[in-house]
Image (cartoon, rainbow, N blue to C red):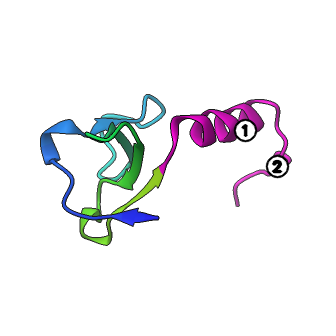
């Protein structure tokens, strides 16, 4: 699901984003307890919405390298 018009003050930048970069992944907790994930350089596109359980499962899979590591390039 995608949600638009989330409050700008509530976004938190990813800890993996460098301070000098113009764009980054941002997250916020919505009023109804969901996790919104968006792109700081294009907030008009909206944010993907996840339940806390679905987001935790995704992060766990990333940490376990369930998707397979790939070198950027």
Q: Which residues are magenta?
A: 50-73
**31 versus 42 height, above or below:** above
Residue at point 82%, 45% (across, down) = 69
Q: Is residue 47 magenta?
A: no
Marks 2 & 1, CB-CB < 8 Å contact: yes
- Displayed quadrant of residue 46: bottom left
Verify whether residue 52 appears in magenta: yes
Q: Position of residue 45 (x, y in %)?
A: 32, 71
Q: Residue sitting at 32 percent across and 39 percent down?
A: 28
- Disc 2/disc 1 C-alpha distance (Å): 7 Å
Q: Is residue 45 above or below residue 55?
A: below
- Residue 1 coordinates in the image, percent (x, y): 47, 64
Viewer-closest of 30 and 72: 30
Q: Secondary structure at mark 2?
A: loop
Q: In this view, which residue lies farthest toward the bottom?
A: 45
Q: Is residue 20 left or right of residue 15?
A: left
Q: Position of residue 60 (x, y in %)?
A: 72, 31
Quarter of the view holding residue 18: top left
Above or below, 6 against 64 in this view is below
Q: Which residue is mark 1?
A: 62
Question: Mark 1, residues whose alpha carbon is within 10 Å: few (<14), some, or many (≥20)?
Answer: few
Q: Which residue is mark 2?
A: 67
* Image side of residue 43 versus residue 37, left or right: left
Instruction: Give the x, y percent position of residue 31.
Output: 25, 39
Does label 2 or label 1 sit earlier along the sequence?
1
Q: Quadrant of the C terminus?
A: bottom right
């Amino acid at each position: 699901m995608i949600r638009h018009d989330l409050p700008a003050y509530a976004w938190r930048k990813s800890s993996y984003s460098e301070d000098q970069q113009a764009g980054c992944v941002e997250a916020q907790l919505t009023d109804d307890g969901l996790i919104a994930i968006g792109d700081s350089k294009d907030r008009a596109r909206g944010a993907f919405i996840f339940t806390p359980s679905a987001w935790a499962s995704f992060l766990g899979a990333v940490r376990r390298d369930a998707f397979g590591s790939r070198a950027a390039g």
